[in-house]
Image (cartoon, rainbow, N blue to C red):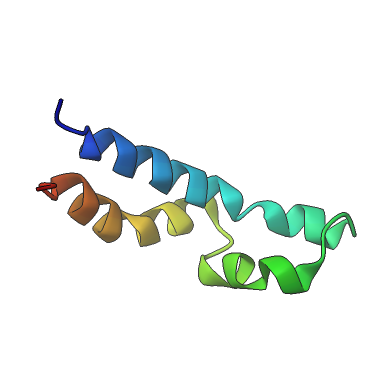
Amino acid sequence: MKPDVKSFAEYVALAYHEARNVRHLVRAGRLDKTRYRLLIDAMDKGRDEAWQQLQPLRKKAAASNPG
């Protein structure tokens, strides 16, 4: 059975995009910023802008052909 790389790439992109919202939990004092700093700082805070940042990598991953 061939892995469904396109779907996997879509799921990972969506999960990463939503994970940027961890900043709200950090701001509320529920999580330690040092642990999530790279995730918080890696993407734009705006929903649409952050999604656009992911598109080139998502498309490249979706088009890959695993051995």
The residue shown at (42%, 52%) is 51
Q: What percent of the width, then of the height, locates residue 22? A: 69, 54
Find the residue positioned furthest to the top: 1
Q: Quadrant of the N terminus?
A: top left
The residue shown at (67%, 72%) is 37
Of 67 and 32, nearer the camera is 67
Q: Quadrant of residue 52?
A: bottom left
Left or right? Give the position of 41 relative to 9. Answer: right
Q: What percent of the width, then of the height, locates residue 38? A: 59, 72
Q: Quadrant of residue 4?
A: top left
Q: What percent of the width, then of the height, locates residue 62? A: 20, 45
Q: How many numbered circles does the render carry?
A: 0
Left or right? Give the position of 30 relative to 67. Answer: right
**In this view, 45 is above or below 65:** below
Left or right? Give the position of 3 relative to 51. Answer: left
Q: What percent of the width, then of the height, locates residue 65? A: 10, 47
The residue shown at (45%, 42%) is 14
Left or right? Give the position of 47 relative to 26. Answer: left
The residue shown at (80%, 60%) is 26
